[in-house]
């Protein structure tokens, strides 16, 4: 997870934006917005979550690659499993 206060701040800001997008999507659904607008909001929300995933994954990989080769292989296997579960 975040390894510095600046990184933590960036992640929390991103989560806040995602929360705002999710709330906008909820309002659109409650108000009966047109399907195209709802689909566009869903796509934007999905992109935002994917961006968050990429940022956390990058941080994790940078930390893990500093380990010994044996530890690194085990951790890479764990990360691959995580990414595969995310992409299902």
Image (cartoon, rainbow, N blue to C red):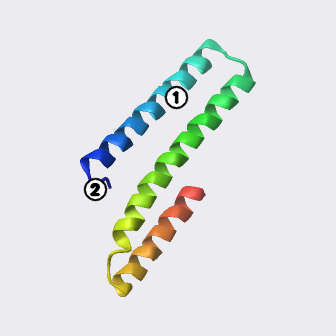
Q: Nearer the viewer, residue 32 or 24?
A: 24
Position above or below: 64 against 87: below
Crowding around mark 2 (Cα neighbors within 10 Å: few <14, some 14 to 19, many 20+) is: few
Residue indicated by mark 2: 3
User: Looking at the image, which residue is at 56% across and 36% down?
Assistant: 45
Q: Residue furthest left?
A: 5
Residue indicated by mark 1: 21
Per the model, the C-alpha gap separating discs 1 and 2 is: 26 Å
Q: Residue furthest front?
A: 6
Crowding around mark 1 (Cα neighbors within 10 Å: few <14, some 14 to 19, many 20+) is: some
Query: Contact, CB < 8 Å: mark 1 with mark 2?
Result: no
Where is residue 57? Give x, y as percent.
44, 59
Q: Which mark is residue 87?
A: none
Residue 71 location, quadrant? bottom left
Q: Secondary structure at mark 2?
A: loop
1 or 2: tag closer to the N-terminus: 2
User: Looking at the image, which residue is at 60% across and 19% down?
Assistant: 28
Position above or below: 16 against 77: above
**Direction from residue 87 to residue 36 in the image, left or right:** right
Q: Secondary structure at mark 1?
A: helix
User: Looking at the image, which residue is at 39% across and 66% down?
Assistant: 62
Position above or below: 48 against 1: above
Q: Quadrant of the N terminus?
A: bottom left
User: Looking at the image, which residue is at 37% across and 87% down?
Assistant: 70
Residue 25 location, quadrant? top right
Residue 65 location, quadrant? bottom left
């Amino acid at each position: 997870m975040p390894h510095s206060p600046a990184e933590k701040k960036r992640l929390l800001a991103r989560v806040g934006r995602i929360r705002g997008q999710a709330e906008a999507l909820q309002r659109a659904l409650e108000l009966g917005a047109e399907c195209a607008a709802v689909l566009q909001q869903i796509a934007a929300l999905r992109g935002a979550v994917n961006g968050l995933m990429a940022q956390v994954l990058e941080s994790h990989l940078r930390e893990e690659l500093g380990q010994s080769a044996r530890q690194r292989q085990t951790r890479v296997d764990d990360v691959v499993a995580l990414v595969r579960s995310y992409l299902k």
